[in-house]
Image (tube, rainbow, N blue to C red):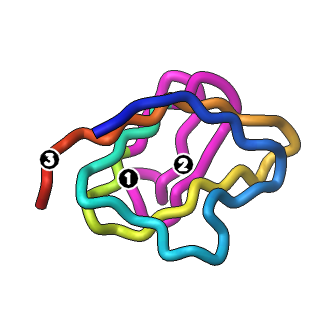
Amino acid sequence: MGAGRATFGPHTIAHEGEDHRHAYDELFWVLSGNIAVPGCGKGNGKAGPGEFIVVPAGQEHHLTNRTDRSCTVLWMLLGRKR
C-alpha cells in the first residue's frame, strides 16, 4: 500500500512504454487540471478537479494529460488484492 501526490506536465503519458500495473486497486483523485486513464472509470477514464478514477488491480494503466496545463493528483493504492 502507499499514497502520494504527483504532477503531470502538459501532453504527458505516465509510464509510457512500460507494462504498469499493481496487485492492488489504485485511486487517483484530481486536485487540479484534467487527466485521463483510458479504459478506466466512467467517461472513458476522464476526470477533472474533485473527481476520481479507480484502476482495478492488475489492469495496465497510464495516466494521460492531453491538455496544455499541468494536472496534480493524489494517488492511493487501496490494498484490496484481487
State the extent of the magenta-drawn residues as a range: 30-53
Residue at mark 3 to residue at mark 1: CA–CA distance: 17 Å
Q: Position of residue 19 (x, y in %)?
A: 49, 75
Q: Which residue is identified by label 3?
A: 80
Instruction: Tell me the SS state at disc 2.
Output: strand
Q: In the rendered image, which quarter is residue 6 located in? A: top right
Is 62 contained in the magenta span?
Answer: no
Q: Amino acid at mark 2?
A: Lys
Q: Is residue 78 left or right of residue 47?
A: left
Q: Is residue 25 left or right of residue 39?
A: left
Name the foreground residue: 1 vs 6. Answer: 1
Which of pointers 3 and 2 lies earlier in the amino acid sequence?
2
Closer to viewer: mark 3 or mark 1: 3
The reply to whether dot 1 and dot 2 touch (C-beta < 8 Å) is yes
Q: Position of residue 52 (x, y in %)?
A: 43, 35
Which of pointers 3 and 1 lies earlier in the amino acid sequence?
1
Identify which residue is drawn at 83% across, 36% down.
69
Residue at mark 1 to residue at mark 2: CA–CA distance: 8 Å
Name the foreground residue: 13 vs 46. Answer: 13
Q: Which residue is identified by label 1?
A: 41
> Residue 46, labelled with which disc?
2
Identify which residue is drawn at 82% across, 54% down.
11
Identify which residue is drawn at 66% across, 39% down.
34
Is 37 contained in the magenta span?
Answer: yes
Q: Amino acid at mark 3?
A: Arg
Closer to viewer: mark 3 or mark 2: 3
Q: Is residue 19 left or right of residue 35?
A: left
Q: Is residue 59 above or below residue 80?
A: below
